[in-house]
Image (cartoon, rainbow, N blue to C red):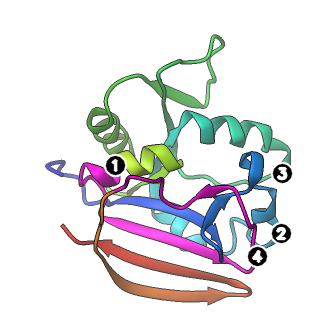
Amino acid sequence: MTDASTGKVVVNRVMSLDGFIAGPGHTMDWIFEHMTSATFPEVMAATGAMLIGRGTYEVGKRMSDEKTDYDGGAQFVLTHRPPDEPDPNVTFLTCGIEEAVATARRAAGDKNLEILGADVAAQCLQRGLVDEILVYVLPVLLGDGVRFAPPGLDRIDLEPFSNVQSGGVTMLRFHVRK
């Protein structure tokens, strides 16, 4: 990217051992059985903004009772259809993926931009906008749901640079080879 910020664009994923980032019906309650914002606090501290897909935003709204208390900075939701009622905690973007990433990176300042949502992450990966992938592997098999990467994503080579375990959660980090 040509942005002058020192932060990275990081696809952040929680994944079951069998490769799902959400269960059937986009359920994600299984995540909170294993993780809290205190599991890897350095990730939250390094994040200045989040770019989220509309579907992930909607799942997050349904899960708001879970008390996730994750503060990743300014939240941007990329969507073709902004909601009728605005959310004061979110900026809705209807632009292309490159402009959305640039906007959210500016808001992140010198911290990382976290990418959440299967479709938004795939678009960023396809366009070479991602610097790093961070995956939390949880000790659960879901059997079905939303896969880590959608069908049709081209091959992307990664370079592992870190793996850390906290309880039953293993955090894997990869640089995206460009």
Q: Tell me the SS state at disc 2.
A: helix
Quick check: is 163 in the magenta stretch? no
User: Label 2 amino acid?
Assistant: Glu
Mark 2 vs mark 3, CA separation in Å: 11 Å
Sequence-first disc among 1 and 2: 2
Sequence-first disc among 2 and 3: 2
Mark number displayed over residue 66: 3
Q: Magenta span: helix, strand or loop, mainly?
A: loop
Sequence-first disc among 2 and 4: 2
Mark 1 vs mark 4, CA separation in Å: 27 Å
The residue closer to the viewer here, 70 or 85, is: 85
Quadrant in which the C terminus appears: bottom left
Q: Tell me the SS state at disc 1.
A: helix
- The percent position of residue 44, horizontal first and vertical second, equals 55, 63
Residue located beneath label 1 in the image: 124
Q: Read off the magenta span.
A: 124-153
- The percent position of residue 137, horizontal first and vertical second, equals 62, 76
Mark 2 touches mark 4? (CB < 8 Å): yes
For the point 79% across and 44% down, which residue is it? 63
Mark 1 vs mark 2, CA separation in Å: 29 Å
